[in-house]
Image (cartoon, rainbow, N blue to C red):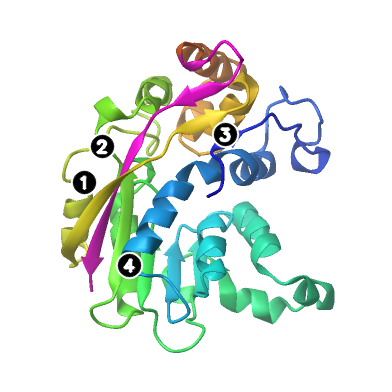
């Protein structure tokens, strides 16, 4: 299993234009921070779901909000044929680095990459062979800017899958079992609700079931998975959490230095004597059927 504790990383100069780890990251830097620091925190969720639905050589997977492709990479390592879509081109570039064979990159095989990963909505996806037989939407429901948009994407994706295929939805577990919730409230408080949408909100008990119902899907099982967030030091924790996009609304209306200061203060109670930062969390998943 991929370790969830992330040791300190110096930001690469190509990501943000600076090797200073305290320098504010731009969109490219945050995409790199997501791939290098934050994305692996959800590996226990990915693996639990793949074990539950039996991902293997016969799986044709469509990942919605695939980010920088770690969940797809894990599925591909199990033999699955994978395809992903995401709205963030920066994260997709990193996914292409992970998922495109070295030989194809050297040959400049853009066509092969285009069939594997697409920027935008699910209709741009193409199943490697035939229809998909698994759809995943691991991005937590409480972290998307538009439930209507996510619902529409699920409806479209379900139409690309074989009838009866599992559609897996991911989300935060109960607030009282998610230590990171207290930290994410900083994003909620700093964001001006009159000027922004999106950001983080606490999860409701039936969020995933309600989303499945909106998309015309039939619930067929669920589970909970421990996903602790672990960082080598406080700067890495700040960078990792800022890379999630949950603080973007706050950054639109508050200076970056102020957001980072308040985020650091919220993280202090979770810092251990050795400098590492640990937060216990529980995530939920729902398996629905088309």
> What secondary structure is found at the residue carrying circle 3?
strand
Label 3 belongs to which residue? 5
Q: Disc 3 to disc 2, how far (Cα)? A: 25 Å
**What is the x, y in percent for residue 229?**
48, 32
Q: Which residues are magenta?
A: 270-290
Can you give x and y, in whole percent of width and height, for residue 254 in the image?
52, 20
Which residue bears the numbered disc 2? Answer: 203
Whether the residues at callouts 3 and 4 have beta carbons within 8 Å, the answer is no
Image quarter of residue 143: top left
For the residue labelled by badge 2, is the local secondary structure a helix, a strand or a loop? loop
Q: Closer to the camera: disc 3 or disc 1?
A: 3
Q: Determine the CA span between mark 2 and mark 4.
A: 24 Å
Q: Is residue 98 left or right of residue 222?
A: right
Identified at 34% across, 79% down, the residue is 161
The earlier-in-sequence mark between 3 and 2 is: 3
Q: Which residue is mark 4?
A: 53
Q: In terms of sequence position, does the residue under pointer 1 or pointer 4 come before the other?
A: 4
Q: Secondary structure at mark 1?
A: helix
CA neighbours of label 3 inside 10 A, class few (<14), some (14 to 19), many (20+): some
Q: Which residue is mark 1?
A: 207
Residue 275 included in the magenta stretch of the image = yes
The answer to whether one can see residue 271 in this image is yes
Task: Determine whether the residue tagged by mark 4 lies in a helix, strand or loop.
Answer: helix
N-term mark: 3 or 4: 3
């Amino acid at each position: 299993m991929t370790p969830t504790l992330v040791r300190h990383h110096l930001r690469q100069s190509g990501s943000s234009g600076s090797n200073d780890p305290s320098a504010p990251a731009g969109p490219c830097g945050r995409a790199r921070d997501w791939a290098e620091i934050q994305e692996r925190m959800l590996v226990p969720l990915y693996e639990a779901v793949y074990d539950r639905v039996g991902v293997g050589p016969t799986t044709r997977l469509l990942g919605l909000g695939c980010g920088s492709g770690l969940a797809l990479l894990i599925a591909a390592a199990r033999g699955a044929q994978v395809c992903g879509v995401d709205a963030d081109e920066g994260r997709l570039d990193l996914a292409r680095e992970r998922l495109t064979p070295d030989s194809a990159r050297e040959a400049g095989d853009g066509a092969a990459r285009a069939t594997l990963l697409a920027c935008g909505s699910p209709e741009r996806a193409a199943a490697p062979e035939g229809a998909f037989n698994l759809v995943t939407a691991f991005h937590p429901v409480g972290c998307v800017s538009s439930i209507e948009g996510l619902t529409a994407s699920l409806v479209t994706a379900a139409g690309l899958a074989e009838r009866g295929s599992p559609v897996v939805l991911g989300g935060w577990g109960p607030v009282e079992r998610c230590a990171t919730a207290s930290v994410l409230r900083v994003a909620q408080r700093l964001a001006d609700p009159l000027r922004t949408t999106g950001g983080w909100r606490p999860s409701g008990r039936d969020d995933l079931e309600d989303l499945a119902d909106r998309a015309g899907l039939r619930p067929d099982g669920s589970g909970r998975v421990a996903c602790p967030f672990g960082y080598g030091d406080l700067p890495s924790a700040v960078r990792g959490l800022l890379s999630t996009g949950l603080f973007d609304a706050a950054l639109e209306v508050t200076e970056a230095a102020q957001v980072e200061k308040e985020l650091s203060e919220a993280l202090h109670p979770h810092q251990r004597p050795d400098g590492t930062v640990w937060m216990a969390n529980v995530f939920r998943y729902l398996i629905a059927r088309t």
